[in-house]
Image (cartoon, rainbow, N blue to C red):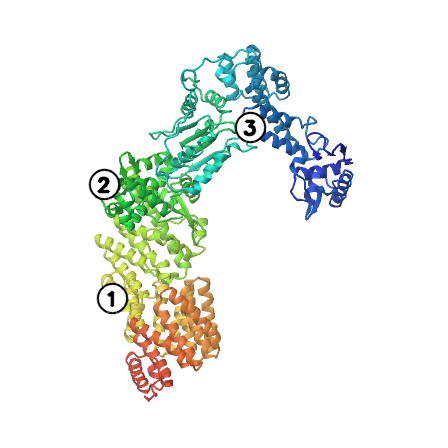
Amino acid sequence: MFEVRLLGPVEVWEGGRRAPLGGSRPLAVLAALVVHLGEVISTERLVDFVWDEEAPATAGALVATHVSAVRRALARVGTAEVIRTRPPGYVAELAPDRVDARRFEELLAAGRSLGRTEEAADVLAEALGLWRGREALEGLGQSFARIEAARLAELRLVAQEESFGLALELDRADGTIAPLLAHVAAHPLRERPRGQLMTALFRTGRVSDALRVYQEGRAVLRDELGIDPGPELRAVHQAVLTHDTGVLGTGRATRPVPAPRSGRPRPAPSHLPPDIADFVGRADQVKWATELVRGVGDTGRTAPPIAVISGRSGIGKTALAVHVGHRTAELFPDGRLFVDLRAADTTPLEPADALARLLRAMGVAPDTLPSGVEELTGLYRTHIGHRRTLIVLDNAAGETHLRPLLPPGPGSAVLITSRRRLVALEGAAHLDLAVPDEAEALDLLRRVAGAGRTGAEPEQAAEIVALCGRLPLAVRIAGARLAARPHWAPGRLAGRLRDERRRLNELSAGDLELRTSLELGYADLDPQERRALRRLALLDLPDFAAWIAAPLLGIGTEEAEEAVERLVDCHFIDVIGVDGTGLARYRIHDLAREHARERCLVEESAEDRAAAVLRLAASWLDLARKAAARGPGGAARHFPEPAAVRPLDPETEEALLARPAAWFAAEQAGLLAAVTHCADHGMARTARDLAGALIASSAALYNQFDAWSRAHTAAMAAVRRGGDVEGEAWLLTGLGRLRYEQDRFEDSYSYFADALRLFGERVPDGSAVALAGMGTARREQARYAEALELLEAALERSGDTGDAGARAGVLYGIGYVHLEQGRGPRARAALSGALALYRAAADLHGEGLTLRLLALCDRADGQYADAERLLRDALRLFTGLHDTFGVMYTEQALAKVELRTGRTAEAGLRLARCLAVARERQDRFGEALVLRTLGELRLAAVDPDAAREPLELAAALWAELGLPLWRARTLWDLTAVWSADGETERVRAARAEALEVFRSLGGREAQEHAGDELP
């Protein structure tokens, strides 16, 4: 049989012939490939293996030479195909059982898996018999060879010590003393064989020799390492001193013959709680844990399988562990142990107490237990080391409390439950238990409450599950309450659970109480973690980024992120995704948040709570102000300066504001929650400042008007309660702006007019904003004379020293009116002034708007090249700002230039994109404008039939929006469609109507069509 031998000098044998491998370099090449059996080793790695760091320049070529030499040597025994070329190097293709080192490892694993049997002893003897020398890979000094030799030497020691242990188990103490003496002498620092030698000496009646072996070992450890013997060896020493045959056993000759028992033998301990009869779901998690526990019998294992099941209070960790324990009970004939490491109070069970419970469960007499943790640990490991036991450690508080409780050998398995992740626990596999899906939660509710109860009102049952956050304990309690009250319909319980402030009170049934479970989890946290959780729960935020903990707690952002992540590890906070700024978003489970808020109200003063909220609001406001200046809305979105701002550190600020629109989108829900909280808790000024910040957020940018409206409504109620007239006026301007964005121009005008009345003469900046808003609403309604009067009044009210952005906005509006009335030079003058002010304020959004309007002036004068140049400049600005609306309106204007210069194909593609954006963002004005331009495009292509639909849709939208001028313009376009179809009377009526509108509103078309005659 062909064989490569590594357990001694490296040799190759085929039957009775040894292949002459020649020099040390070919030998090293073969050894490196066999050590990495089946792995393709590149030429470069082989160079490193063979020469370490002293390779000659020709080493790559020499590798090929040495490989050829190995192949020639192997060919002499008929196995040249063992070494194959595989880019980028070579591979040894050989069955593992053809390598003595691999066969040794397999036999060692098999022997250890066979338990305390004669067969196991024979298998280990066979494994040790494969060794032919003192060291593996003898004669090779390369680093890889030394490392592999050290690994195999350690396994050899393990095999020898396992063999000694089996000999003792099989009552062969006499035959083990001599080899153990040699082994201990050769390896004086290894404590396990020293303990085995002491046990063998004790069993043969040589107690004094056993004690001397211990003393020698203690002296060596102190001299060489400066330490005392470990707990296992000390436990053996204690057993020798006390003649504890329960630990050390007795020799076969002197072991007393047990008297026959009249009753049944003492059963193996089984302390698992009963399995839950209505356990449902968790199929994947049960499979994971079951397969891990069943790995207790795997060959090659040297340590117990350990599973950590972590999750929040009430998630079902214990139920899962117990269920898995019952499913795998047959694997553990020596018992199933269960220890609650928290028990009923909030203090973790000390390791010494837990060890004592485990030892008593295994039959150790209580009065013989030592008092110290180290001695208890040693005794525990001695008793558990060769047993096949399942150990369930429930409610673990931390890794330090667990380590003494872990068995030393591979025969047992451990299931641990904890509210923490316990990531530092060596060798453990981890399962983060999440809430079950809706179907599993509904199934649990049905089983507990009764199928008839939940089936009668399935929607209400689903609501109960949702209000319980699908938390199994909460769902179970809700089901128990329904079962206990047959006269309650599910809808009644759902109604009682809707009130967040009462929900925890409702989730109590018998000795099941969700608040108690949450309290135990809360008690697990250290004081700083509790404070962080309380503050994060205070505002009812639907989700948040970690940085908000910094102002809430008054700490730095790095420390804040660490605080949040610690709460993630404790399963109080979930990571729900990543926002547009690239930051993780977090959320507290609803029930945990309500409990933490309760604790905040009890444990913190009203002053401390308010101070924390105000710090966070100030940070939000500072970021919002800076994001507005950078973002698509720019500084053109005016609101008064907030009462207080609180900058974050520059690095965090820059990371957050790199994408302003994305930051606003991420924080919008939090800002709204903060407005509501501040309004409800007497912080009216902060509420209105935060409501103002929402104007610059995605609420405005993406037509998400509900958040804008709710924030202003809540803040308005607060300022009115506090008698803040100026605050009310500012909020009215915000509502006016909202109605403007919703294309409800008459309502917008009314809000701005009410704000002007409240501002009066006392707040000139505010009255200027109100006048500008009124003028802008009238401008959109094409009531140009009134609009111009209001805008000029706003310009006068703001004064030369007023806010540059506000003045620029008013000049923009004045230029718009002049353009619409056909006064090109005056329009250019006003718009040029606006452009200069926007650029001075570095307001890219305002600059883009003004460039677009100046381009319309050029287009009206037939200067298409100049118009296109300005529009492309504006397009670059809006694209850089990620301003979708700005891009859309600019592309619409550019399409019209392309249409008039004969580039209809380009215009058509551009308008298709614009229409999709307008409809997606529910911008009815934009949709009507693009539809009209599409109609004009099709008329230019002499396709009146195709132009009919977009023009008629546009006309209907203008009518809905109450914009007669734009409807009149579209009707004028439609006359070309109707003329082509011979609808003469319809054309006559439409032109008459349009001309009347042009003349009455003073639009530029009144001049353009002054000579037109009706057909």
Q: Answer above or below: position of 1012 versus 708.
A: below
Q: Name the residue under label 1.
A: 750
Q: Mark 3 points at which residue?
A: 114
Tell me the CA gap for discs 2 and 3.
56 Å
Coordinates of residue 927 in the picture (x, y in percent): 37, 70
Query: On residue 485, which mark appears?
Result: 2
Q: Which of marks 2 and 3 is in front?
A: 3
Q: Which of marks 1 and 3 is in front?
A: 3
Tell me the CA gap for discs 2 and 1.
55 Å
User: Sequence-wise, which precedes: disc 2 or disc 1?
Assistant: 2
Q: Which amino acid does label 2 sit on?
A: Arg
Coordinates of residue 997 in the picture (x, y in percent): 29, 80
Q: In which quarter of the image is residue 313?
A: top left
Name the secondary structure under disc 2. Answer: loop
Q: What residue type is labelled 1?
A: Ser
Name the secondary structure under disc 1. Answer: helix
Coordinates of residue 376 in the picture (x, y in percent): 45, 21
Q: Answer above or below: position of 802 versus 510.
A: below
Tell me the CA gap for discs 1 and 3.
89 Å
Name the secondary structure under disc 3. Answer: loop
In terms of depth relative to the viewer, which is nearer, 1011 or 705? Answer: 705
Q: Which amino acid does label 3 sit on?
A: Leu
Q: Are marks 1 and 3 in contact (CB under 8 Å)?
A: no
In terms of depth relative to the viewer, which is nearer, 1007 or 200? Answer: 200
Badge 3 density bin: few <14, some 14–19, many ≥20, Cα 10 Å: some
Q: Which of marks 2 and 1 is in front?
A: 2
